[in-house]
Amino acid sequence: MCEGYGVTRRSIPMKYAQISSACECQAKLFADLDEKRFVLRGWAKDMRRKQEQNAPAHSIHADSQQFQVAWLCPFCNRNTLRSFDATGLAWREAPAAAAEAQTD
């Protein structure tokens, strides 16, 4: 959309970490975090029903060593809060399309 107006896109490599936890209903909750530990996307998988759905998620105290992530489980409608330590995150390179979306 911006092409043709002299705007150029820069490819910025972005790293992300994926965290997971189990909900009380036994669904598996996932979230992708950016390098500032903000949630990029949250989702849940229920293996019994063989379903995957979006699960709204957000990080709390993302700038601290110990931070929390809260999810709204789409299967049981519970708010689930879990604590994580930043030193335990495994970082991966994001696909090129995701890195380009961050520059918009």
Image: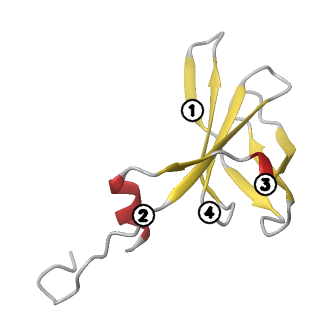
The earlier-in-sequence mark between 1 and 3 is 1
Amino acid type at circle 1 is Gln
Task: Report the quarter where the C terminus lies.
Answer: bottom left
The tag on residue 13 is 2
Q: In this view, which residue lies farthest toward the left? A: 4
The residue where tag 1 is placed is 53
- Distance, label 2 to label 4, CA atoms, is 11 Å
**Residue at (16% x, 90% y) in the render:** 6
Q: Is mark 2 in CB contact (under 8 Å) with mark 3? A: no
The earlier-in-sequence mark between 1 and 2 is 2
Looking at the rendered structure, the secondary structure element under dot 4 is loop
Check the image and report above or below for 96 versus 76: below
Question: Taking 54 as reference, is 8 left or right?
Answer: left
Task: Please tell me how crowded label 3 is: few (under 14), some (14-19), or many (20+) other residues with Cα within 10 Å.
Answer: some
- Distance, label 1 to label 4, CA atoms, is 24 Å
- Distance, label 2 to label 3, CA atoms, is 20 Å
The residue where tag 3 is placed is 86
